[in-house]
Amino acid sequence: MSALTDSPAWRALEAHQRTIASRHLREWFAAEPDRAARHSLEGAGLFVDFSKHRVDDRALDLLHRLAVQQDVEGWRDRMFSGEAVNTGEGRAALHTALRRPVSMPLPVDGVDVMPAVAEVLGRMRVFCEAVRSGDRRGHTGRRFTDVVNIGIGGSDLGPAMVTEALQPYTDDCLRVHYVSNLDAADLATRLASLDPEATLFIVCSKTFTTIETITNADTARQWLLAAMGDPRATGVHFVAVSTNLEGTRQFGIDPDNVFGFWDWVGGRFSLWSAVGLAVMLAIGPCAFDELLAGARAMDEHFLQAPLERNLPVRMGLLGAWYTNFFGAASHAVLPYDQRLHRLPAHLQQLEMESNGKSVDRQGRPVDHATCPVVWGSPGTNGQHAFYQLLHQGTQLIPSDFIIARQPHHSHPQHHRLLVANCLAQTEALAFGKTGDEARAELAMRGVAGERLELLAANQTFGGNQPTTTLVLEQLDPHAVGALVALYEHKVLVQSALWNINPFDQWGVELGKKLALRIGACLLPSAVPAAGLDDSTRALIDRLRT
Ligand code: F6P
């Protein structure tokens, strides 16, 4: 037993879970007429209803004690102040500096980082304005009409998600595309519809060594040069976002066209940095400022709100409650907004790459669950696909429902039905339908006897599935910034609860290394390397072309 699972707060939670495990949300609501008001919190413009969770005041109190015991506020404060909270790599994790007022100094290792942050943001603004206005043009003098961001993981998912989410704020004369996959079908399909003379590429890679990104960038450069016939076109049509200036120079990108950031910005937390260049091109510098302002508002809320009213703290604690004390193995994110269709993918990386760990900060194996599988897709599509399992399957799956009060379109009928479906699903998941209710409905329809019993069994809904409902006023840059920052801070909270380092990702390295060796074995003339297992060797033989 570890110090954590043997701690008073943990043991008290285990004991309390046993006393309330069979209690139904129907009972919680019946006993507490003002439950919605008591369990709803607000911050940074977001309203969050936590009332449909399987907690009472005692559970919340014990969860807050766990947060205190695990020093959640201490980790938060150390992260914001630039201490080396990335303990394994001995670095700060300062994505919050990227949205901090530039007038507030922030020394890291004795050097104020804010002037550098402001300098890069300033260069991004000038660049984006020049491209958007047409002042900055392609090699043949044509205006840029298309931008292709080549990156993967944090250098793709966050910016791509935000660009989709903020489509109503984008400029029609500049289309922004994202290419990530090593499968050339991704790049080739995109290039097929583009005009090289009017296409600007952003090679976005913190390390500038990621095989997918470098391979795609090489192929894109060949495509450009084949059309232009002049190697100088690379310098005009390619810019880079990276911390690796030597790598970008070797690729042929002019240092003036490189937008830097710092090792204290983790890939999955980087969309606020120059990694957001494609976002800024799409929505413009003013809207990008609003995105940062939204994230900053959530930062301030996280810093200032007491534990009991703190959105990221409550989200993190409730997640741990189900993961560690109810055995929930997954968590669904269900945005009732088509423009947030890439949010689950971004949150998968954010949460699973951060907290999908099995050793603690001291390198000892943990004896409790850590990050659940995060998954999801937009409502209402999911209702006609996997919600069956949420309603009548055998697993406890907590889920987040996200909805904006005001749509961007002028089809109120659609929005009314969308809202109705969102609320109906959380109601059905919470309260279900009892066997007696199912029987009464069937009897009303004239069904009787064995048939009634069979149908009633199939038409009973257990309910008691916990949900959080997040309400935005509108899916605008400020709200998107606040929403993403909320989940970032949830990650920090849970990492503190589990005593793990959320800011490294060693789990991705082994596969990368093995792919290099297998890649060499796949060459037509190669002999499979010694030491390969029988399965891999046989598959290499089958797949070699
Ligand atoms: O392989 C995982 C990872 O390192 C992520 O953490 C990162 O976001 C992604 O690859 C891309 O890395 P880079 O920006 O260095 O190309």
Image: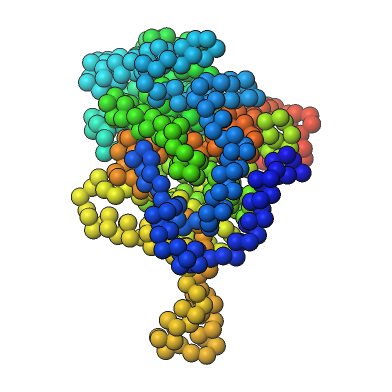
User: Can you name the residue that lies furthest to the left here?
Assistant: 410
**Residue 503, quarter of picture:** top right
Q: Can you give x and y, in whole percent of width and height, for residue 49 in the image?
A: 41, 52
In the displayed structure, would residue 520 be above or below residue 51?
A: above
Q: Can you give x and y, in whole percent of width and height, for residue 69 in the image?
A: 62, 38
In the displayed structure, would residue 224 be above or below residue 465?
A: above
Asked whether the viewer can see residue 377, the reply is: yes
The N terminus - image quarter:
top right
Q: Can you give x and y, in whole percent of width and height, for residue 383 in the image?
A: 43, 60
Q: Nearer the viewer, residue 298 or 29?
A: 29
Q: Can you give x and y, in whole percent of width and height, for residue 410 in the image?
A: 20, 50
The residue under the point 29% across, 49% down is 405
Asked whether the viewer can see residue 179, the reply is: no
**Residue 51, quarter of picture:** bottom left
Q: Nearer the viewer, residue 246 or 64?
A: 64
The residue under the point 63% across, 25% down is 87
**Residue 528, quarter of picture:** top right
What colour-coding does the image apply? Answer: rainbow
In the displayed structure, would residue 176 be above or below residue 235?
A: below
The C terminus - image quarter:
top right
Q: How many marks?
A: 0
The residue under the point 42% across, 53% down is 38
In the displayed structure, would residue 320 be above or below residue 414?
A: above
The residue under the point 54% across, 77% down is 457
Horizontal arrangement in the rendering, residue 532 relative to residue 114 (left or right) = right
